[in-house]
Amino acid sequence: MRIAPFFIAALLSLPLASQAATAPMEAALAAYESGDLALAAKRFAALSAQQEPLADFNLAMMHLRAELPKPDLRLAQRLLLRAAAKGLVQAELSLGYFHEQGVAGKPDLGQAVQWYSRAAKHGSSDGQVALATAYYLGRGAPLDMEQAAHWYREAAKGGDVGAQYLLASMYETGLGLPADLRLARYWYDIAARNGDEAAPAKVKDLDKQLAPDATT
């Protein structure tokens, strides 16, 4: 079974849910973290039978990561849908990746955007970036720079460095929102402080443009 590399990377950026509320969930997570995948799967499955959304999500991840003897992508999708129906944001985001990459069939960008939108509205920075990018590129959503700027801003406020840089660029060029070099510098500076390698040079460039003698 082969899954698109982007999907794997995206999933691996989502750690197995760690906000365990019960001893059985803690035991299942402990088994996973110790590398005992068979025991972890057994424990997650028992909790999933009780329709525990965190167990549904984690068991789905094990299927998608091929960590089970017989991975089942369709079962993983059903588990994610059930977890998402109970408001688990990680499941909403993962369903976006699932449809975007066509993991169990053909890619469906429209469905992907619907799930990214749900995750974004529920506060997921990754979902906000994915939704913003869909509007920015017109992939699975109408080309809409104002919506792109809105969701990049939400992700930037949540600490996403890439969104901070892109939002700064949009303020610098007036793409999707009124051009504002001071706000552009503000977001470039935040991106720089958060480790973006290109942002420091942009801050220096804008400092020159904003200097009093630059306008005389």
Image (spheres, rainbow, N blue to C red):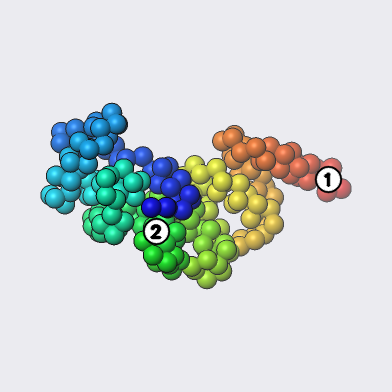
Q: CA distance from mark 1 to mark 2?
A: 53 Å
Residue drawn at x 28%, y 54% is: 72
Tell me whether the residue at label 1 lies in contact with that at label 2, contact meaning CB atoms closer than 8 angstroms.
no
Q: Quadrant of residue 173?
A: bottom right
Q: Quadrant of residue 35?
A: top left
Instruction: Of the two numbered discs 1 and 2 on the same chain, state the one appearing first in sequence.
Output: 2
Measured as percent of width and height from the top left, residue 139 is found at 52, 66
Outermost top residue: 34
Q: Residues within 10 Å of mark 1 (few under 14, many from 20)?
A: few
Q: Inspect the image, locate mark 1, and give the three-letter code of the amino acid beneath it.
A: Ala
- The reply to whether residue 65 is visible in this rendering is yes
Q: Inspect the image, locate mark 2, and give the three-letter code of the amino acid beneath it.
A: Val
What is the total number of numbered labels drawn onto the structure image? 2
Q: Is residue 138 above or below residue 123?
A: below
Outermost right residue: 216
Measured as percent of width and height from the top left, residue 132 is found at 51, 58
Residue drawn at x 48%, y 56% is: 130
Tag 1's secondary structure? helix
Residue drawn at x 63%, y 49% is: 168
Q: Is residue 177 above or below residue 197?
A: below
Measured as percent of width and height from the top left, residue 148 is found at 54, 60
Q: Say which residue label 1 marks.
A: 214
Q: Say which residue label 2 marks.
A: 103
Tag 2's secondary structure? loop
Mark 1 vs mark 2: give the one in front.
2
Measured as percent of width and height from the top left, residue 91 is found at 32, 52
